[in-house]
């Protein structure tokens, strides 16, 4: 009984994450090596990536003319640059084993950043005069150790990184680098990282509303606008080689908002019939639901640092706050608030996405343990939900897993919405 009590205390004591994190990363490194050696590589998009970047390296700069085995190039320019480097390192994409090793190191590096974000996401005394009030200060100080095994146990996530080599791996890496930088109030680095992630895959635009609200509260208006302008500059810079040739072609392919996905590849809406899935009404309903959920979170959760209503906030921002008021609001933008807002925004967007492919799980796997913890879900419930999340299978069970994939982010979002423990600083 004494041993059991000690194990429970260890699992709940955040101080133990300091030594637990490197042990889990070391164990996962061994698991990655075992997967690469024992599990056959699965070709999905890697060859198409290599075909597309080879055309870029041969001098093609018209985005509409770059194509691969799976179709035209539909990712922003940072994707092209990243896979051009991989093309050169892996002998034109032929050295798959080396590519898998590179992705294994990428996976472990991102995992380290994710764990650092979890450990940073706590209620902090930012200055000696700042006092944390409410139950959060005592009951929710820092992510507990029992969360961390969930970050390394995903079979699906290992597959996405090590066996499929998707570009989502780089995009999710930039997302968590941005979160880590924002948590440490390194606003320029965070903004560049986030924009480069968007330049890798536009899925990261789903986190954009939270990033914008975050910057407008943490920084004075001029500095916030400078950060947003910097993100735009990054996009122009990475797109510049293609803009002189065909600017509209680049924008239409890299950020193709009107794209209609094939029904056979969808996972989350497979239980909807194809006619409904492809209808304009269904697409409009999803966009409306996304906007409604974002508005709800802005009005009730994301503006808490400013202590202003959704109607007051833009007026107060435009009029410029006093230095003292700005400092008070900025201090309320804690690392925990930062991570909660950005991951919630991402999950809301995924919930309302018209289609989720298997690689989109990379944005979910490392987000939901934190959001479930923030919602004060019992650890047993968290592991049960995580197990259901891992049931994203293929073939005949797609209809049922589609429902699971739809219900899981919905439950997590609603649990996070019902959480009243977002920090307040007095």
Image (cartoon, grey):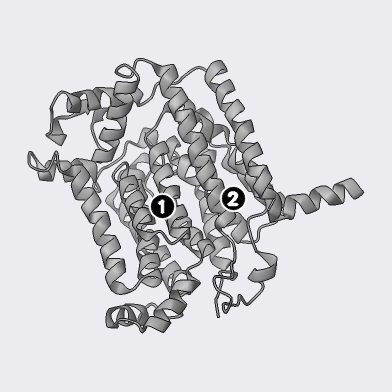
Residue 198 in the image, given as x and y percentages of width and height? 31, 47
User: Residue 77: x percent and y percent?
Assistant: 24, 39
Q: Is residue 230 left or right of residue 22?
A: left
Tell me the element at label 2. helix
Image height check: is 394 above or below 356?
A: above
> Can see residue 306?
no
- The picture places residue 175, in percent across and down from the top left corner, at 41, 48
- Label 2 to label 1: alpha-carbon separation: 19 Å
Mark 2 vs 1: CB contact within 8 A: no
- Name the spot of residue 317 as percent of width and height, x first: 32, 78
Q: Residues within 10 Å of mark 1 (few under 14, many from 20)?
A: many
Of 166 and 277, which appears nearest the observer? 166
Tell whether 300 sits left or right of 149: left
The quadrant where residue 390 appears: top right
| Residue 137, quarter of picture | bottom right
Which circle marks residue 178 in the picture?
1
**Where is 249 relative to 158, above or below?**
below
Outermost residue, right direction?
1
Residue sitting at 60 percent across and 27 percent down?
A: 31
Q: Quadrant of the C terminus?
A: bottom right
Residue 426 has which mark?
none
Please report the residue visible at 38 percent of the width from the left and 42 percent of the height from the top. Answer: 171
Res. 138 visible in picture: yes
In this rendering, the answer to whether 88 lies above or below 318 is above
Mark 2 is surrounded, within 10 Å at the Cα level, by few (under 14), some (14 to 19) or many (20 or more) other residues, namely many
Q: Which mark is residue 369?
A: 2
Left or right side of 62 for 335: right
Q: Secondary structure at mark 1?
A: helix
237 vs 155, left or right, is left
Mark earlier in primary sequence (2, 1): 1
């Amino acid at each position: 009984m004494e041993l059991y009590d000690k194990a429970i205390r260890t699992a709940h004591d955040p101080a133990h994450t300091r030594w637990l994190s490197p042990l889990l990363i070391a164990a996962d490194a061994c698991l990655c090596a075992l997967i690469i050696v024992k599990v056959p590589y699965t070709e999905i998009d890697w060859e198409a990536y290599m075909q597309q970047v080879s055309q870029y390296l041969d001098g093609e700069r018209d985005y509409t003319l770059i194509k691969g085995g799976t179709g035209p190039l539909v990712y922003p320019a940072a994707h092209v640059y990243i896979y051009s480097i991989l093309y050169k390192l892996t002998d034109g994409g032929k050295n798959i084993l080396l590519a898998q090793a590179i992705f294994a190191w990428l996976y472990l590096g991102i995992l380290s950043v994710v764990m650092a974000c979890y450990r940073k996401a706590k209620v902090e005394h930012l200055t000696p005069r700042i006092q944390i009030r409410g139950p959060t200060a005592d009951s929710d100080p820092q992510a507990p150790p029992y969360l961390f095994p969930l970050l390394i146990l995903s079979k699906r996530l290992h597959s996405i990184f090590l066996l499929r080599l998707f570009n989502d791996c780089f995009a999710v890496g930039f997302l968590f680098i941005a979160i880590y930088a924002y948590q440490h109030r390194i606003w320029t680095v965070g903004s560049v990282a986030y924009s480069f992630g968007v330049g890798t895959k536009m899925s990261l635009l789903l986190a954009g509303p939270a990033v914008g609200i975050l910057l407008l509260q943490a920084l004075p208006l001029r500095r916030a606008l400078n950060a947003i302008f910097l993100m735009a500059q990054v996009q122009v810079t990475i797109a510049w080689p293609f803009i002189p040739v065909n600017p509209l072609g680049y924008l239409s392919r890299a950020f193709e908002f009107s794209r209609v996905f094939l029904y056979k590849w969808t996972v989350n809406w497979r239980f909807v019939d194809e006619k409904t899935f492809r209808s304009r009404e269904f697409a409009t309903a999803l966009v409306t639901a996304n906007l409604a959920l974002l508005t709800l979170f802005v009005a009730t959760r994301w503006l808490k640092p400013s202590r202003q209503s959704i109607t007051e906030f833009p007026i107060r921002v435009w009029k410029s706050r006093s230095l003292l008021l700005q400092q008070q609001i900025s201090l309320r933008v804690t690392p925990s608030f930062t991570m909660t807002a950005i991951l919630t925004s991402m999950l809301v967007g995924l919930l309302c996405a018209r289609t989720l492919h298997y690689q989109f799980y990379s944005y979910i796997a490392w987000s939901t343990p934190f959001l479930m913890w923030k919602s004060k879900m019992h650890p047993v419930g968290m592991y049960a939900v995580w197990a259901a999340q891992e049931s994203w299978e293929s073939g005949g069970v797609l209809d049922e897993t589609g429902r699971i994939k739809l219900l899981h982010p919905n439950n997590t979002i609603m649990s996070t919405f019902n959480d009243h423990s977002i920090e307040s600083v007095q």
